[in-house]
Each structure stands twice: as structure tokens, then as C-alpha cells.
Amino acid sequence: MTPGVELRDLTVGYTHRRAFRKRTVTEIAAKVNAVARRGELTALVGPNGAGKSTLLRTLCGLQPPLHGRVLVDGEDLATVRPADLATRISVVLTDRIDPGLLTVRELVALGRTPHLPTGARLSSEDRAAVDRALDAVGAALLASRQFGELSDGQRQRSLTARALAQDPSLLVLDEPTSFLDVPSRVELVDVLGRLAREQNLAVVMSTHELELALRVSDRMWLLDADRTLTCGTPVALAESGRIGAAFDRGRMRFDPRRMVFDLEAEDSRV
């Protein structure tokens, strides 16, 4: 598989600047090295507060790294112009959006904006790209409906279609299954895996749906509470004991053989 995105000795976090005070730096994760390949679905998992969203924001260029590099298709993001970056990376965040009275087709068409000269209208090629994106996520029948009328699952499909319309090489999604019911979660993650394979995309998503990620992702990035990133296949991470070490709580224990969490029986003396 071709590397889609590479993290090289990457340190992520925040720089705090206050008037008349010395600059302070807060590191979230340090010296991270990882690869997300084209044609694969990579799931970023970890406990709450481990820094998954910060890592994703740095990965897609929304905030600068404190140290190290992010490479997309071999090119350092720090050297890419913002206008060009928007044609390579598509992002779907957890923020709820309100596009007013836009239809789904009009929303998805916004994904073509990075490819258009200022003030230009959609060409036939752009409209075809919008149609392909709608078809790819199974949202063609939603095209004429207003976005505000949709269910959460339909909205997430529409936002994913907008991201696809950009024709990116890297698709980044922060908690795409949030607010979805169980069938919609499974359907969406299945769509993301299929898109990675069929369109040769590097797809990276953060998720709290650990058991689902273990079953459907090709590769996992596990960001521990101690801010250490471990990479590998779901089976390799499960068998290594890293999943259990990161997520076991109280009576809840991870079973690496069955790839699920179980509750241990209560002590009979209690």
C-alpha cells in the first residue's frame, strides 16, 4: 500500500502566548511516528482526554506541530500552500453545522470550491464529481432534500460526500459515528472502509466505537492515556495486551481472543 500520510517524530500540543509573560508550551503527544496508507481505513482510538482530536487537527493542517513533520503523499504539509492543501485533505469534524436552506446537492457541491477559480461556476466535470460523491456514500436519493431535514445518519453521509467531492488523497474524520444509532454507525464505517479501497484513499477516523473499529479497520493507532502512540493491525494490538492496558476499568476486561469487552463476575463475598 502507498503511504498516504506519515507522521515523523511529531510532537503535538499548544503554545500559549500571554502579554508580558514568557511563552509556555503544552505537549499532548511527543515524538509520534505513524503511517496511514492509501487504500486502508485507519482508526485512531484511545481514552478520553488522550489527545486524539489534537493529533487529528495537526495531521490535517488545522494547527501547526510543535515539532516534527506531517507528510501527505511524501510532501511536508509545512511547505504546501493552504489553497493546495484543500485539494489534498478533506476533513469532517464533530461540530454541528447549519447550512441554512441548502439542499444536500448544494452542500456537497461546496466540496468543489478548492478546485474553482474565484467566482467561477461549477463545470460539467465538477457536477459529475458531485454525483460520484453522492453515489459513493449512498446519498443520491437525498440530493434534492434540505440538509436540515435529514436524520443524523443521513447528515453524516452527506458531509462525507462533501469531503469526497474535494477529490482528496487523505480523508480525516473526527468521531464520525457520534450521534448515530447502532445500524447507522455500522453502515457509515462500512462505507468508509469501502471508499478507502475503491478510491485508493487514506482514511483516518477517530472513534470511541472500539469494538467496531477492531472489527472493520485495516490499521489502528492507539493513543494511550500516557500519550504514547502504538500502531498496528487490530489483531496485533489486541494480542499485544495494549488494548486491555488502555481501556480495562474495574470489572470491565478486554478479551483479545473474541475482540470484545466483558464484565467479570462480582466477588461472591460482596
Image (cartoon, rainbow, N blue to C red):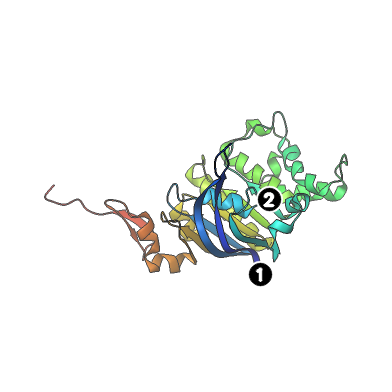
Indicate whether 156 appears above or below 34: above
Q: Residue 78: which quarter of the image? A: bottom right
Note whether residue 38 is visible: no
Could you tell me residue 228's position as x and y percent?
Answer: 45, 60
Please name the residue that numbered disc 1 is placed on. 2
| Left or right: where 212 falls relative to 124 | left
Could you tell me residue 226's position as x and y percent?
Answer: 41, 56
Q: Which mark is residue 19?
A: none
Please name the residue that numbered disc 2 is placed on. 90
Indicate whether 119 appears above or below 48: above
- Between 229 and 262, the residue placed more toward the observer is 229
| Left or right: where 93 falls relative to 230 | right
Q: CA distance from mark 2 to mark 1?
A: 18 Å
Could you tell me residue 189's position as x and y percent?
Answer: 55, 53
Q: Residue furthest left?
A: 269
Which residue is painted at 51% across and 59% down in the image? 30
Q: Residues within 10 Å of mark 1 (few under 14, many from 20)?
A: some
| Left or right: where 26 falls relative to 243 | right
Which of the image's four quarters has the N terminus?
bottom right
Q: Dot 1: what SS? A: loop
Which residue is painted at 33% across and 55% down in the image? 248
What amino acid type should be assigned to the residue bearing mark 1? Thr
Note whether residue 71 is visible: yes
Q: Residues within 10 Å of mark 2 (few under 14, many from 20)?
A: many
